[in-house]
């Protein structure tokens, strides 16, 4: 139920959809002669879109998440690597059979690099299809084609293709590998996604070392207008809102112990 509620809520809450729905509501109000409601809805929709696309708001929201788990020094020995899904274009890969990467594709490039640096480490790819309506191939089904092409032997891969969200990533990954005390496992995911991921893996009893990738901010952003192209700014805002809402929702539901997990939690 949590999965379905989160997907429905996010459909309405993401900035672009929210602005479109406000405009539609304003048009309906205008049709019934409610001119003040129409003007208010149009103004709010414009404000949402302008803030998301023309300001540094998204980057300013993402940066505290990206800084929460600093990149660690490389361990001397690694027993396993867990990479979370979210780096492939699932619908395209299902249709074409390739391994097209999206903006989160750094996760899998870094995993290939780590796999070659630590040739004895097992590699867990965790990620099924988390879409509610769109059909797509799960990342754990696509990843072997890319990783093998990048020189990672298929017999090292452990594929977890049932999970639909980060909570299930943690649970199902632990079930598959049953990590032993004293082992070193790296968790590879986007830097902004790392606080929620680390908290969920800790809650599942799977001790991992944060290995953040896919940074979206430089750490030097300030308050400003037109600091990036509008498409990237809108994407940053969308990801930031989603991640902060996810943190609060997981905290309120008891799935994590803090609304902003960090290395000390």
Image (spheres, grey):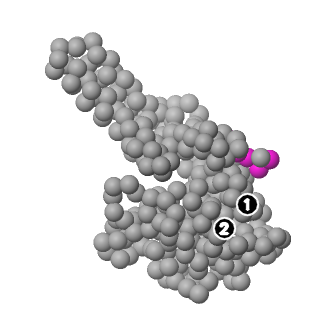
Asked if disc 1 and disc 2 are in contact, CB closer than 8 Å, the reply is yes
Residue 65 visible in the displayed image: no
Where residue 265 appears, as percent x and y from the top left, is 77, 46
Q: Is 201 left, or right, of 7 in this rendering?
A: right
Q: Nearer the viewer, residue 212 or 163?
A: 163
Q: Is residue 161 above or below residue 5?
A: below
Q: Which residues are magenta?
A: 260-264
Residue at image mark 2: 174
In which quarter of the view is residue 234 placed? top left
Please say whether residue 68 is one of the residues in the magenta stretch. no
Q: Is 159 left, or right, of 212 in this rendering?
A: left
Q: Is residue 128 above or below residue 49?
A: below
Which residue is rendered at x = 35% and y = 39% of the image?
A: 17
Q: Main secondary structure of the magenta part?
A: loop
In which quarter of the view is residue 187 placed? bottom right
Q: Is 24 left, or right, of 249 in this rendering?
A: left
Task: Give the numbered dot on residue 205.
Answer: 1
Where disc 1 sits, the SS reads: loop
In which quarter of the view is residue 176 placed? bottom right
Where disc 2 sits, the SS reads: helix
Which residue is rendered at x = 50% and y = 70% of the image?
A: 161
Q: Crowding near pointer 2: few (<14 within 10 Å), some, many (20+)? A: some
Which residue is rendered at x = 65% and y = 44% of the image?
A: 254
Q: Crowding near pointer 1: few (<14 within 10 Å), some, many (20+)? A: some
């Amino acid at each position: 139920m949590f999965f379905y509620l989160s997907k429905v809520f996010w459909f309405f809450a993401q900035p672009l959809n929210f602005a479109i729905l406000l405009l539609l509501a304003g048009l309906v109000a205008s049709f019934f002669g409610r001119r003040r409601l129409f003007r208010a809805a149009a103004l709010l929709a414009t404000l949402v879109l302008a803030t998301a696309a023309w300001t540094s708001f998204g980057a300013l929201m993402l940066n505290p998440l990206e800084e929460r788990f600093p990149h660690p020094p490389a361990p001397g020995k690694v027993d396993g690597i867990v990479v979370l899904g979210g780096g492939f274009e699932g619908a395209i890969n299902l249709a074409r059979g390739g391994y097209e990467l999206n903006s989160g594709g750094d996760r899998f490039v870094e995993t290939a690099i780590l796999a070659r640096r630590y040739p004895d480490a097992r590699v867990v790819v965790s990620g099924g299809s988390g879409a509610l309506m769109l059909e797509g191939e799960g990342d754990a089904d696509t990843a072997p084609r890319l990783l093998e092409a990048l020189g990672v032997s298929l017999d090292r891969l452990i594929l977890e293709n049932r999970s639909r969200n980060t909570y299930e990533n943690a649970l199902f990954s632990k079930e598959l590998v049953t990590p032993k005390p004293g082992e070193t496992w790296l968790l590879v995911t986007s830097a902004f996604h790392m606080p929620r991921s680390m908290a969920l893996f800790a809650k599942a009893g799977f001790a991992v070392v944060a290995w953040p990738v896919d940074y979206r901010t430089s750490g030097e952003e300030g308050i400003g207008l037109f600091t990036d192209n509008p498409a990237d700014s809108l994407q940053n805002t969308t990801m930031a809102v989603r991640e902060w809402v996810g943190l609060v929702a997981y905290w309120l539901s008891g799935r994590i112990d803090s609304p902003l997990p960090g290395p000390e939690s």
